Image: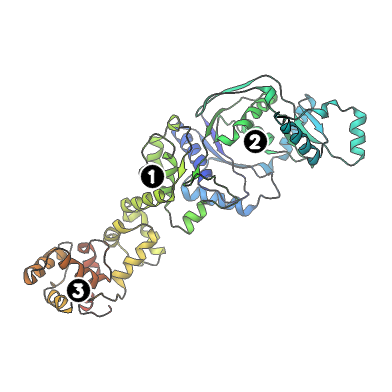
Amino acid sequence: MSTAVRFAPSPTGRIHVGNVRQALVNWLFARKTGGSFMFRLDDTDEERSTQEFADAIAADLTWLGLTWDRFARESDRYPRYDEVAAALKAAGRLYPCYETPEELNLKRASLVSQGRPPIYDRAALRLTDEDRARLEGEGRKAHWRFKLTPTPVEWTDLVRGPVRFEGTALSDPVLIREDGRPLYTLTSVVDDADFAITHIIRGEDHVANTAVQIQIFEAMGATVPIFAHLPLLTDAGGQGLSKRLGSLSVGSLRDEDGIEPMAVNSLLAKLGTSDPIEARLTLDELVAEFDLSKIARGTPKFDPEELGRLNARILHLTPFEAVAARLEALGLTGADAAFWDAVRPNLARLSDARDWWAVTHAPVTPLVEDAGFLAQAAALLPDEPWDLGTWGAWTNAVKGATGRKGKELFLPLRRALTGRDHGPELKNLLPLIGRARSLRRLAGETA
């Protein structure tokens, strides 16, 4: 049987790098094992879920290259959840409860004050038909809990190793709200069973949920998937990430920070593993290197500075053909391979190419400190056509005529020709600037 995994975010905010790491690991696992990757929206939280967020998540996954083989949304499947709930009720595994939130909070507080775990006391199971009729007559509506068995729940986690929960230490979870809507704990299991998900790879914050959900799988008569719980990503300071706070959202990395998708993928694929973090230009490279067993249990930290370094390295390695259309979109009409090869070693973001396009194709105010030296250099400027050897030949001639060398030779020429102290190699820039513009800049004119 082929593997099947899913990424199932709630469309209640923009996904952040922690969410993306889980999506990426699932995607890489599917591609490495020849399986399928499902994008599923867990959107039963109707108060906070929006189509705008759903579209944004889809756009972010597409930008990263994490294409999906199957798609589903929970809000389309309410009849199926009702069907499963009815079967669980008939089997005596779902039972109605009538406590208000305030009453439940008092019960929890009382247990905690006694040093006992806040496990539901199953008081609702002791209600008679008359009790339930009276409560409903008072206007109370039932929420429905799943009755757990006291047997231990055990599984071998692909990241955490052997995991065991005592059944008596678990609290019967609420699966259906007072308004009749099913909660994630139920809907996720039904979807995973119906879509034949073989491996559930998600954050370690779901470990306790897994113990409960395994019993729901079993109560449904469904095959229990294999689980892997990933350590949760934190920011560089060790703080947790949140969709609601917009922490390191994919949208902001793309739209505001100008980060390349493969920089995000290269970092997140290796973060928390035994592999070195290196720039990769394609997802296929990451698939070839992927091994779920390399993921350690320690908490990985996401460092934006490391992402920035990877981003620059990826741009330095990217061929012109891969960015030609994007340069055009930046307004650099006419940018060619010679321009790209000249400037890419100095780019941190693709948008930085605009600065060097301005240096080579727009007026620049030269920095002039020794007009006499620049006049001597201008007199020795060779005729065109120019190539990559022109800079060396010219500066050798200037060196022979003036006796200057090193920084005293090169820096005044760079400042005059580019208006800057540093940048791409001038052997690459000079042919792009051209002789006419170079002569005017050497003469101190804005050109």
The residue sitting at 16% across, 71% down in the picture is 384
- Please state which of residues 218 and 163 is positioned toward the viewer in this rendering: 163
- Residue drawn at (7%, 71%), measured in percent from left and top? 401
Separation of residues labelled 2 and 3 (CA atoms): 67 Å
Q: Nearer the viewer, mark 1 or mark 2?
A: 2
Helix, strand or loop at disc 3? helix
Circles 1 and 3 in contact, beta carbons < 8 Å: no
Which amino acid, mark 3? Arg
Relative to 223, does residue 305 appear above or below in the rendering?
A: below
Please report whichever mark, 1 or 2, sits nearer to the chain's N-terminal start.
2
Q: Tell me the number on the disc at residue 188.
A: 2
Pointer 1 or 3: first along the chain: 1
Q: Earlier in the sequence, mark 2 or mark 3?
A: 2
Q: Is residue 223 visible?
A: yes
x and y percentages locating residue 419 in the rendered image: 28, 71
At horizontal 75% and vertical 28% (from top left) the residue drawn is 88
Few, some or many residues within 10 Å of mark 1 (<14, 14–19, 20+)? few
Q: Which residue is mark 1?
A: 282
Which residue type carries mark 1? Answer: Thr
> Dot 2: what SS?
helix
Give above or below for 355 relative to 158.
below
Name the residue carrying label 3.
435
* Residue contact at pointers 2 and 3, CB within 8 angstroms: no
Disc 1 + disc 2, Cβ < 8 Å: no
Q: The disc labelled 2 sits on which kind of residue?
A: Ser
- Quadrant in which the C terminus is drawn: bottom left
Distance between the alpha carbons at the discs numbered 1 and 2:
32 Å
Describe residue 376's horizontal placement relative to residue 278 as left or right. left
Residue 361 image point, x, y percent: 30, 71
